[in-house]
Image (spheres, helix red, strand yellow):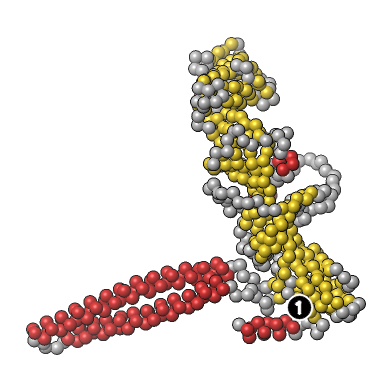
Amino acid sequence: MTFILIAHIFIASLFMPADTVNTSSSISEVTVFRQQAQIQRTADVDLKQGKNIIVFNRLTPYLNQNSLQLKATGTFTVQSMKRRFNYFFSDIPDPQIQALEAQRDSLQQEITLLESDLSVIQNELRLLENTTSNIGNKELTAAELAQFLDLYRERALYLKKDEIELNESIQTGRIQLNKVVSQINELRGGLQTRFSEVIAEVYSEKDQSLTFTLNFLSPSAGWTPSYDIRSDDISNPLNISYKADIYQNTGVDWDDVVITINSGNPSANSILPSLNPTYVDFYQPVSAMEKQALREVVVTGYASTDEAENDMAMEAALPLTDFSRYQTSFSYRIKSPYTVPSDGKVHTVEVNRSEVETNYSYTTIPKLSQSAYLVGHMANWEDLNLIAGKGNIYFENNFIGTTIIDPDTFDDTLTVSLGRDESIVVERNKVQDFEERNFFGNKVREKNAWEISIRNSKDEPIEITVKDQIPISRNESIKVESLRLSGGKLDKETGIITWMLTLPPSTTETVRFDYQVEYPSGQQIRY
């Protein structure tokens, strides 16, 4: 191994001038944006007076060359800076892989020895069979034949038993060998066969030692927001845990580095788009060949494969973070060093935890689900710096389900559904006695009525919002008229009826709505 490393260094040195300084930089800080990361590496370099060539080696192969920045506290001039690939350096051998490779070689040797023993036994069995055939051509007494058969039976059974045991041992060994080889392949999947190097030509007016900072962007990293929304009961506010699901596949582990989570996205186009003319022309039908070509255009996208854990977990201590707001983004700087391996998997870190005053109420839409849902209404959510993402909901120490947090769709209040309440019974039934269909002239008039009953089986009063709807006509020949609403408020644009009810403990309340639809006879309607 030492010889190979020396050979790599020797071959690489053949392509560099004599005044080259190879540095072993380390990652000191990472700023993770939504779809990429800015990596900061530091290195101590001894500069000589005049021209110096500094090589920052073993960098991620996935870096944006246009984002390279080199800084240091001191007087120097960067004359040029470029990136290249180095295929001579490979990942430092993983001790786990080395142990598995030793186990693989041991298993392979053991299987080979077992197969050799099996081959000997099988040859002896064939020899025994041939001897039996030859005995048949000789004249033996009854006593000699009986003695031979006894010896044959004893030896054949012994060999067959060994053959079966050896086959089982070989099969077991091969299964274990396949597992070890699969694990080696899995671990080797993250190893790099090439690295980037950044070569900087630096001019110094004097001999000096400087600490250089190299910054660059890598597209092989990012983060997505996720949330845990918790409440003990309806007498307590909601607690929102703001988490960052970080991933990176840069080929270099981030070991104990300071990480900053930034809501910005440098990969997004930052140039103001221009408005081009829109032209009108006569419509030309699309030919069958053109239609087929359009069908062959496929748009693909990526979906997340990793789902959040649904089990209730004990809350960990919140890491110390510094929050900063900028003109177009905000960030959380995690003060404690954090490790994110280069495995492409999600590594979650909690960056903030907030307690929000919450008003609770119940809502039911019995046309869609005859259940009552507990809903939390948070008025002061703007300062939470939320980004659209998935949220896990926990209520009364139980996992309720998941929801989507999308601040772009919120009004003044953030509403979160906290699950069904089985102690509130909801029923929706059609009033059959009221249903009728009459004809008059060239018109048909249909009448419908629905009753909704809500029973509060809880020991305390509840406030519940009930929603249903009447159909909306999109044809002037079809007229819809509400006849009874039982105190509900009708939104004429959507047809949605809303009742705001307060139910004392162990009581039932019923609301009813009637409507009629009038349309020309001889036509059929659907709604």
Q: Amino acid at mark 1?
A: Asn
**Residue 273 in the figure: left or right of residue 179:** right
| Residue at 74% over, 71% down | 25
User: With respect to residue 73, does 126 lie above or below?
Assistant: below
Q: For residue 7, which quarter of the picture?
A: bottom right
Q: Secondary structure at mark 1?
A: strand
| Residue at 50% over, 77% down | 102
Q: Position of residue 257 (x, y in %)?
A: 70, 63
Q: Position of residue 370 (x, y in %)?
A: 52, 29
Q: Quadrant of the N terminus?
A: bottom right
- Residue at the right extreme? 205
- Residue at the top extreme? 440
User: In this orientation, which residue lies closer to the viewer: 268 or 105?
Assistant: 105
Q: Quadrant of the C terminus?
A: top right
- Residue at the bottom extreme? 138
Q: Position of residue 491 (x, y in %)?
A: 68, 23
Q: Is residue 248 visible?
A: no
- Residue at which label 1 appears: 22
User: With respect to residue 105, does 219 lie above or below?
Assistant: above
